[in-house]
Image: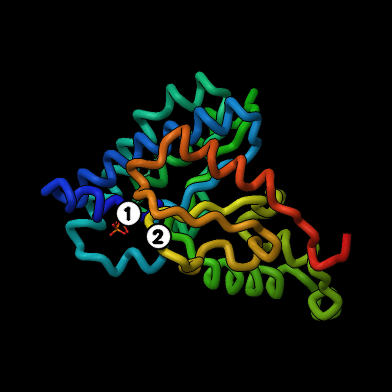
Amino acid sequence: MDGNGRWAKARGLDRVKGHIEGVESVRACIEAAVEKGIEYLSVYAFSEENWNRPQEEVLALMELMMQSMKNEFGTFLDNHVRFMVLGNRARLSEGLNRTIDEMMEATSRDYRSTLILFLSYSGKWDILQAMKKAQAQLSPEAFQAMDLPDFDRFLVTAGIPDPDLLIRTSGELRISNYLLWQTAYTEFYFTDILWPDFRKPQFFEALEEYARRDRRYGKVK
Ligand code: FPP
């Protein structure tokens, strides 16, 4: 969800105002995804690297996460959306973790779509924690015999399908340590639009572009 800071700067506003406007885009995309029957929508809200931003911005972002989750609770219920947070939750505050647990529990039944907020997440961290978990849980023989699907279940995304489409806004052409393992065959869509300007029409345009892609998974068709 890149470009919040630049969106704010272009208007002479504080960077945090850009993040606040970015939450409106998250809501628009949830509604658009539900409308199209998309079962999983993931947003990369805060990376492990983002902890290195100035402390005021980190604190403001964490506060915004907490407020936005609470504010969007109605959106989740109205749209039958299950809310999930994945990432290194040990780094989040106790209060934020409590709110996350309550919201995940409250939206865990009677859902049609799932919104995953990746928070304090990085792809390399995920692979490393999966490796450690696998080694701790499996016998040395089972660990050695581990196959690709066996490994998948140790990632934080266990049980969740790999993404079909990854959208990156604001003209950045990188993966920035997002779902490294899970995006092996994901289609990428890059746009110069800044995240606060990425609303329903822009989301639908990305879906139309995706529909034109020819997915071969390394095979010949
Ligand atoms: C990247 O823009 C955006 C973020 C680091 C934060 C995004 C988080 C939200 C919009 C909150 C979502 C929360 C909920 C609960 C829906 P940037 O700061 O890197 O912008 P720049 O590239 O212009 O500097």
Task: Kindly identify which residue carries mark 2.
Answer: 171
- Label 2 C-beta lies within 8 Å of the nearest ligand 1 atom: no
Q: Amino acid at mark 2?
A: Gly
CA separation in Å, label 1 and label 2: 9 Å
**Circle 2: element type:** loop
Q: Are marks 1 and 2 in contact (CB under 8 Å)?
A: yes
175 vs 7, left or right, is: right
Q: Residues within 10 Å of mark 2 (few under 14, many from 20)?
A: few
- Label 1 C-beta lies within 8 Å of the nearest ligand 1 atom: yes
Q: Quadrant of residue 48?
A: bottom left
Residue 176 in the image: x percent, y percent?
Answer: 46, 68
Task: Kindly identify which residue carries mark 1.
Answer: 3
Sequence-earlier tag: 1 or 2: 1
Residue 159 in the image: x percent, y percent?
Answer: 71, 49
Q: Is residue 173 above or below residue 186?
A: below
Image point (72%, 62%), residue name: 152
Of tags 1 and 2, the one toward the viewer is 2
Q: Quadrant of residue 46?
A: bottom left
Q: Residues within 10 Å of mark 1 (few under 14, many from 20)?
A: many
**Circle 1: element type:** loop
Image point (52%, 63%), residue name: 178
Q: Amino acid at mark 1?
A: Gly
Image point (26%, 45%), residue name: 63
Residue 154 in the image: x percent, y percent?
Answer: 68, 62
